[in-house]
Amino acid sequence: MAYSRSHLRYLEDFAVGQKFGGAERVRVDAARIKSFASEFDPQPFHLDENAAKGSIFRGLAASGWHTAAMTMKLLVASELQPAGGIVGAGFEEFRWPTPVRPGDELRVESEVLEVRPSKSRPDIGVVKIRTTTYNQKNEAVQVNVGSLMVPRKP
Amino acid sequence: MAYSRSHLRYLEDFAVGQKFGGAERVRVDAARIKSFASEFDPQPFHLDENAAKGSIFRGLAASGWHTAAMTMKLLVASELQPAGGIVGAGFEEFRWPTPVRPGDELRVESEVLEVRPSKSRPDIGVVKIRTTTYNQKNEAVQVNVGSLMVPRKP
């Protein structure tokens, strides 16, 4: 848990163009790719090296939802730290440009695209953020643009 | 695994307005909400009932990525069955309108919004689908609009 009260950011602390990274890395291994897939995404290209060779992925690849979940872990541990936690209202873009492979080491970076008060709730606002997950070759494996609900300063 | 070769659908088998459901249900329990969160989304409102009471969720709620992963499990088992598997190119909309709670029973429904051949690859096409995950009260807990890559008939 990366909760450090002193670093919590309220709506007023966010500004367009800010970038947040994180020192944390997640290393992906074949066994967890397969066990995650067998619980949540049981398709041959996430379960078995040989079956994956003949698929569109041309080799074992992590489920996109596994990548999304690992990204969330990195984001929670990152410098972002909105007060009230990372609560996503939704995404307007979400894609996986490069497959995640066994042995990959992932890191995350986010950039603030927009900051605005909520129309309906005076106590919160919306921070629109692009979050990019990179592998060790600096290829983007996941890109999303989402809106976080962030409390205003009390 | 819900792979039945006889039901595999190629691009030519999809048409706008088709709906696909599934008999499968996933029951959500508090222990898995917490263990998923502790691996991937360690925030108080996904980990602890008491901490969750004071949060925006007003009670323990599943991580959105847990909901996304359970939805994928339901989708793989559903009637959708594209040839080549369910391979998402990306989403243009993705949101969680209602929190997922312990005891919820989830099901999935998808509707075809668009079918088109790929501009760059003659062997595949894109099927745009809205996927809605419902709880036992028929409240939508997740809605997304995404594009699947689907092979054309050989």
Image (spheres, coloured by chain):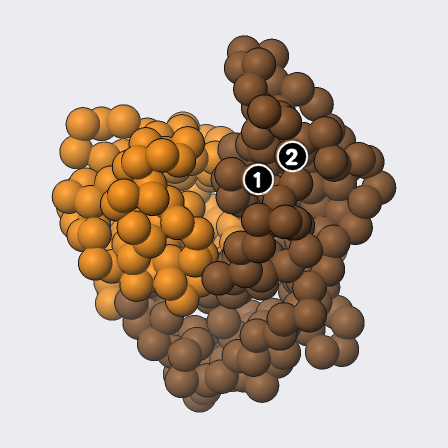
Chain colours: A brown, B orange
Q: Residue at x 62, y 45 (%)?
A: A8
Q: Which amino acid does label 1 sit on?
A: Ala
Give the residue type that dot 2 points to: Tyr
Q: Is residue B116 visible?
A: no
At horizontal 33% and vertical 44% (from top left) the residue drawn is: B51
Residues under numbered marks 1 and 2 in contact, where contact means CB atoms less than 8 Å apart: yes
In the image, is B4 to the left or to the right of A3? Answer: left
Quarter holding the C terminus of chain A is: top right
Q: What is the residue that sits farthest to the top in this orientation?
A: A120
Asked if residue A118 can be seen in this view, the reply is yes
Which percent across, then down, holds residue A118?
60, 18
Residue underneath mark 1: A83
Task: Report whether mark 1 lies on the same chain as mark 2.
Answer: yes
* In the image, residue B76 above or below residue A30: above
Label number found at residue A10: 2
Residue located farthest toward the front when viewing the structure as drawn: A6
Element class at badge 2: loop
Look at the picture and state if A26 lies above or below A11: below
Residue A58 coordinates in the image, percent (x, y) = 57, 79
Report the side of A30 relative to A26 (left or right): left
Mark toward the start of the polypeptide (1 vs 2):
2
Can you give x and y, in whole percent of width and height, for residue A74 in the image?
Answer: 58, 63
